[in-house]
Image: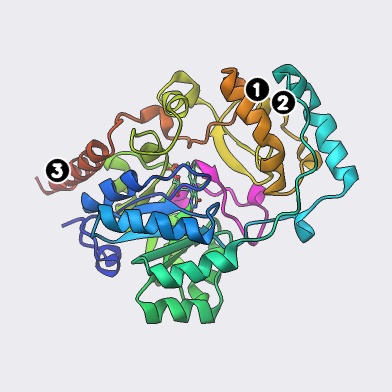
Amino acid sequence: MWYNTKATEILDIQYPIMQGPFGGNLSSVELVATVSNAGGLGGYGAYTLSPQEIVAVDKQIKAATNKPYNVNLWVSDTDAPDGTVSDEEYNRVKNLFKPYFDEAGISLPEKPVPFKSRFENQLQVIFDIKPKVFSFMFGTLSADVLEQCRRLGIKTIGAATTLDEAILLENSGVDMIIASGFEAGGHRPSFLASAESSTTGTFVLLQLIKEKVKVPVIAAGGIANGKGVAAAIALGASAVQIGTAFLATDESNALPIHRLMLFSDAAKYTTLSRAFTGRLGRGLTSRIAKDMWEKEKAFIPFPLQTTFMSPLRKAALDQEKWDMILFWGGQIAPILKHTKASELMQSLIEETTAYFDGLKT
Ligand SMILES: Cc1cc2nc3c(=O)[nH]c(=O)nc-3n(C[C@H](O)[C@H](O)[C@H](O)COP(=O)(O)O)c2cc1C
C-alpha cells in the first residue's frame, strides 16, 4: 500500500502524513491529538514556550493521545548579537513604521529588553518528556545531542531548504529530513545561505535531496490534498508535512479571522516578508508587507522585530485593520476545503488511496 513507507515504519504511524508544527502559539493540543489519533503524526511548535510550558503542553498531549507525536523547536532562536540592537538601529525601525503606529493611534514601543536564547533549556525538556519525534529547524544539532536522542528512543527530523543543508543534516546523523519548499507557509528555515537565496520549490528540492541523501525525505510545502500527497510519494517522498491546510482547520490555534482569511479571496496572493518578525516568512500579502518590500535593511533582527511589531499587530486586530497584519499561509491556500482536521485527514487518505488504486485499473 502507498502508506507503508520507511517513514511510517520509523515513526510507528499508519499514514505518512505529518501535521506541520506551528510556532508562535498557533499549535494546539487538540490538533496534534486529532491528527495522531487518525493515524498521522501531529506536531506541536514549541519554540516560544518556556521549559515549564513545554512540560505542561506535553502532559496535555499525552492525555489526549497514546499515539506518536512530534514536538518542534528552533535550533537558532535569535539573530540579534547579545540579544539587543543599537539605539541607531532602533530609531531607524521606529521611523520606518511610525506612520502605521500613528494610523493605529498607538505610541511606538520602547526598545525591547535584550532577548536571551531559550533553546538550550528547551532541549533539556525534550530529553525529559521524550516525544516519539523531535523535529527542529534553523540549523543542525551536535553529535552529542543526536546521540542522546537515539539513546532515549527519540527520532530526529531536521528541515532543509537547499541540497547543501540536507547533506549537512544527513552527515550530522538525523533520522529524517524535511525538504521545505518555498511554497510553504510560515518562516523559511534556511541556515546556510540566506533565506532569500534558498527558494527552491518543494518538488525540485525533494528530487535533488533524494538523489544525494539516503535517509527518508519528507516533502513540505504546497501539499493540501490527496493528489499532492500522491505526487510527493511518486517523486520519492517517504512522507509529507502539511501546514497551511491544518492551520486553517477549527482545531488549530489560529484566530478565527486568520482561518477565514485562508479561505477567502485574499489567499490568492502570498508573499515572503521579513517585516513582521525579522526573518523571512510567507503569509497572505498585506498592505504593510507590500509597503515594506526592499526596506529590509531597516528592520531589526529576529525576534526583536516581532517584539517591536506586536503592539501594532494587537491594535490592528482590535481595530480590524487586516491590511496591517501578515496572516501566515502558503501558496496552496486557495484550494483548501476542510475546516475540520479529522475530515481533512480522512480526505487526504481517501484521495491518495483512490489515486493509487486508479493506477491499477
Ligand atoms: C503559521 C506557521 C507556523 C509554522 N511554524 C513552524 C515551526 O515553528 N517549526 C517548523 O518546523 N515549521 C513551522 N512551519 C512550517 C510547517 O510545519 C510546514 O512545514 C509547512 O507549513 C508546509 O507547507 P504548507 O504550508 O504549504 O503546507 C510553520 C508553518 C506555518 C504556516
Is residue 349 a member of the stretch shown in magenta? no
Task: State which quadrant residue 15 falls in.
Answer: bottom left
Bin the neighbour count of mark 1 within 10 Å (Cα to Cα): few under 14, some 14-19, many 20 and up.
few
Helix, strand or loop at mark 1: helix
Q: Is mark 1 within 8 Å of ligand 1?
A: no
- The range drawn in magenta is 184-205
Considering only vertical position in the picture, is 70 above or below 96?
A: below
Image: 101 above or below 304: above
Q: Amino acid at mark 1?
A: Arg
Res 127 → quadrant: bottom left
Calculate the distance from the C-alpha at mark 3 to the C-alpha at mark 2.
48 Å
* Residue 41 at x, y percent in the picture: 30, 55
Q: Residues within 10 Å of mark 3 (few under 14, many from 20)?
A: few
Q: Nearer the viewer, residue 317 or 248?
A: 317
Q: Quadrant of the C terminus?
A: top left
Please rate how many residues cluster around mark 2, counting C-alpha atoms within 10 Å: few if below 14, some from 14 to 19, many from 20: few
Q: Residue at x 37, y 72 (%)?
A: 154
Residue annotated with mark 1: 287
Q: Using the numbered discs, state the Cα–Cα distance from disc 1 to disc 3 in whole angstroms.
A: 45 Å
* Quadrant housing the N terminus: bottom left
Q: Give x and y (percent) for residue 135.
A: 44, 62
- Which residue lies at the image location 33% right of the left edge and 59% below the top edge? 69
Q: Quadrant of residue 294?
A: top right
Q: Are marks 3 and 2 in contact (CB under 8 Å)?
A: no
At numbered mark 3, what does the secondary structure look like: helix, strand or loop?
helix
Q: What residue did someone put label 3 on? A: 358
Residue 198 is covered by the magenta coloring: yes
Q: Nearer the viewer, mark 3 or mark 2?
A: 2
Residue at the spot of label 2: 291
Residue farthest to the left, as pictured: 361
**Quick check: marks 1 and 2 in contact, CB under 8 Å?**
yes
